[in-house]
Amino acid sequence: MKAHRNKWVMADHAHAWHPFTDQEVWENEDPVVLSRGEGSWLIDVEGQRYLDANSSIWTNIHGHAHPDLVQAIQEQAARLCHSSYLGLANDRASELAEKLCGFFPRTLERCFFSDDGSTALEVAFKMSLQWRQQNEGSGRGERDGIIAFENAYHGDTLGAASAGGVSRFLKGYAEAGLQVYRVSSFAEVAALPQVVVETASAVVIEPLIQGVNQMRTWPRGMLRDLRQWSSERGIHLILDEVMTGFGRTGKMFACQNEEVIPDFLCLAKGLTGGCMPLAATLTTAEIYEGFKGAERTFYYGHSYTGNALGCAAALASLAIFEKENTLAEVERKGAYLEAGLRDKSFVKAIRRVGLIIGVDIEGCGQKFCQDLRARGVLTRPILNTIVVMPPLCISDCEMDFLLAAMPE
């Protein structure tokens, strides 16, 4: 196996290009080469086990190789892996659209499928802007602006990247993308000049907590205030729940914590339980009706839109939530890990929502995570903030293992 591993590493270093990675540094690293997963654990080609403490970049919900998900994918693969969604429907996509909209009856009634979190946001931005062009009278000024928050991250496609507020992800994109007005708090939203308010099509936010911004939390009630503000001014509210969706905050969706319903809800990552790439953008009947007619068609889509395998996995994942009563344990597990982490001397600050935890540390975050890997725990830092976001199925014994791997 050692010889095989060396071959895989050589092939990687010779041909692969990894995301968000300094390839000059990477080519001199001895990487973990993963081959299997079991529950909260990942296993490399030599049999070494690692606790997946960031859910494989925030995607895994019920654990790796969950038997219900494996069975759903296998059965679907034997029937239909994929078919075009252009001018055709498929049974799994129809069922999933109905299931997702069922979480928001008589409000978010339409579901548009795409491939990942970035495209889910791209869909929302494009729908909002095109809807304005097609449905608002000529007497109103053009509304082509997006209000977005500093240090937000909404993905890497052109529109999503330009709406983000992290400078290192904006190189070469900021000027080529959307017209964005940036704010850092609800107070700044409320103080926006009237000309900005009148020309804004939508406001976008990661509800309750910002991910890439070192897991920074929003004040309680801020999301509800933002919903009221945007509704009163006719500005669409876009919620980026790519990270916070599917149980991470203790509710199925973060917006449910403040009883907020947006105009666009963007979902990905945990949608399929962490098994398949799939995204969805939910929106209202009003938005949908504004696209009817040959000259109003929403000309946007991907080859794998409505992918049957991904939809089957997503349906199975949603069924597991009910079968295993997953949401009931999220807050307890998050509080358990937070309490254990607060006893550690290296901790400067902790921010938590449900089972999403950001830990500011003394020292270098990258070095800290390298040391954790040697102790059997995998996660990644955001600067010097350590992300602790395990699969929701993590057991008490596994949480104890995670805490014990942390230095005192």
Image: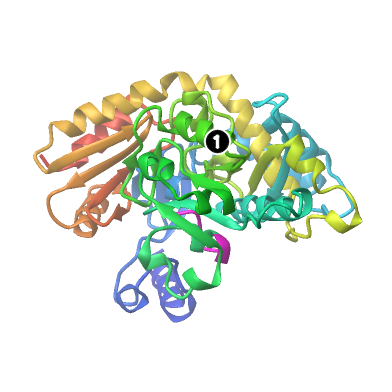
Q: Residue furthest front?
A: 139
Label 1 environment density (alpha carbons within 10 Å; few <14, some 14–19, many ≥20): some
| Residue 239 screen position, x and y as percent | 54, 41
65 or 383, which lies in front? 383
SS class of the residue under badge 1?
A: loop
Q: Picture coordinates of residue 141 (x, y %)?
A: 66, 55
Q: Main secondary structure of the magenta part?
A: loop
Q: Quadrant of the C terminus?
A: top left
Residue 252 magenta-highlighted: no
Residue 45 occupies which quadrant of the picture?
bottom left
Measured along the vertical axis of the image, is residue 255 above or below residue 154? above
Q: Please name the residue shown 54% across and 72% down the image.
A: 176
| Amino acid type for the residue under numbered disc 1 | His
Is residue 169 rendered to the left or right of residue 99? left
| Residue topped by disc 1 | 66
Q: Is residue 272 visible?
A: no
Instruction: Using the rendered image of the protein, determine whether residue 283 is visible from the camera's viewpoint.
Output: yes
On screen, 301 above or below 94?
Answer: below
Name which residue lies at 75% across and 31% down: 98
- Which stretch appears magenta? 152-159
Image quadrant of residue 248?
A: top left
User: Was residue 158 drawn as part of the magenta stretch in this picture?
Assistant: yes
74 versus 297 height, above or below: above
Q: Is residue 121 left or right of residue 295?
A: left
Residue at 11% across, 43% down:
346
Q: Quarter holding the N terminus? A: bottom left
Residue 383, percent from left and from top: 26, 57
Q: Find residue 200 and report its horizontal and vertical position in percent.
A: 57, 51
198 or 251: nearer the eye? 198
The residue nearer to you, when weighing 386 against 105, is 105
